[in-house]
Image (cartoon, rainbow, N blue to C red):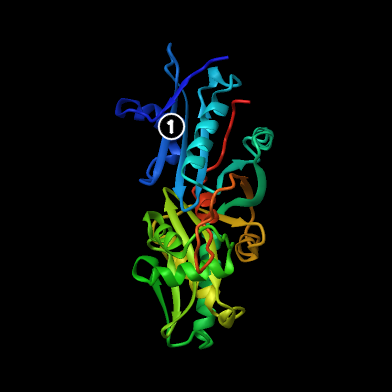
Amino acid sequence: MISPVIRRPRNAELPACRMLLPEAFGSPTRDFLLAVGQEAPYVLGAATLLRMPGALDGVLIRVVHTHRRQGIASRLLERMVDEASTLGASKIAGWIDALSDPAAEGFAAARGFHRVSRATTYESAARPFMELYWSLRRRLAERGRIPAAARVSALKDADRVAVARLWADYIAPDPGLRLDVIAHQLSAGSYAESPVLFSGDQLAGFLLFRSQGEHVTIDARVVTPRFRGRWASIVLTAAAADEAARRGAERVVFTWLEGVRDTAKMASRFPGEIRALADRYERSLGGRVPKSEDSAALRMVEAASKVRVNHHDR
């Protein structure tokens, strides 16, 4: 069995990291590890993670195809667990794609991880989605059912802490994460143009929306109880359709966590197919969970970014 050196990558080795973990690049908050051998290919595997309050999250491991099943992924994971324990983290967590890497469940389970949730990714044509919500919004407007005080703002211009509080209250609470962490994640990069709905000065809901090439992705839609079953969800989603059209989207992707019925219900309106089933796995390390006066969830952000545990080295 190979005994690679596990260390941080040097600048000249970053291209190898990018080849093994392309989906992890673009996030300035990620740490990387390399498994390095004595002979070519010198880079045998790579791992990445996010340092969060009280946890190492977003774990992703890849091993060069010719060197799988030689214990390299196990060594990378052991190093991450050691670092998490040194930091006093309470857990280490990541995502496994149950469709593309079904055997990874056994790898995770054998190393003390257990499944805690699932995120579904579903893809459909964008045009029917846009036309339906434009039609619904037009019908509401013609009947005078959209209040004059209703307005839509981009997330980048809204009170991100208020949006984070709504996320924490209605999506997937995790007591180990704080509102300021969620607020930072929601405002970072791809979610900046997501529509946030107000009725006067009252926050009515938001829709997390991002775009990449011909795809637009809806990761979550939340409407407060006062405005549910009325006009708010239609206005929010039609605003996302406006942005999708502006960007020339051809496909729309929906992601949702178990128990989050709103996005799943929205996706069911359109014929399409499931693209990924991302299972979240966690391992408790017994460290201290940071105190917070509010609970919040980062799970959807990670799932939406398709950052998952993907071990091929068993």
Q: Residue furthest left?
A: 11
What residue does disc 1 label? 33
Amino acid on which the number 1 mark rests in the picture: Leu
Q: With respect to residue 34, does 25 lie above or below?
A: below
Pick the quarter of the image with the N terminus. Answer: top right
Image coords of residue 36 (percent x, y):
43, 20
Pick the quarter of the image with the C terminus. Answer: top right
Between 99 and 308, which is closer to the camera in this rendering? 308
Q: With respect to residue 95, does 15 lie above or below?
A: above
Residue at screen point 53% across, 69% down: 133
* Label 1 crowd bin: few (<14), some (14–19), many (20+), radius 10 Å: many
Of helix, strand and loop, which one carries label 1?
A: strand
Q: With respect to residue 64, does 273 lie above or below?
A: below
Q: Residue furthest top?
A: 39
Image coords of residue 107 (percent x, y):
65, 32
Between 115 and 101, which is closer to the camera in this rendering? 115
Residue at screen point 58% across, 32% down: 311
Residue at screen point 37% across, 55% down: 189
Residue at screen point 65% across, 60% down: 268
For this view, does 275 lie left or right of residue 42? right
Image coords of residue 214 (percent x, y):
44, 49
Image coords of residue 167 (percent x, y):
52, 66
Q: With respect to residue 309, does 126 lie above or below?
A: below
Count of numbered circles in the view: 1
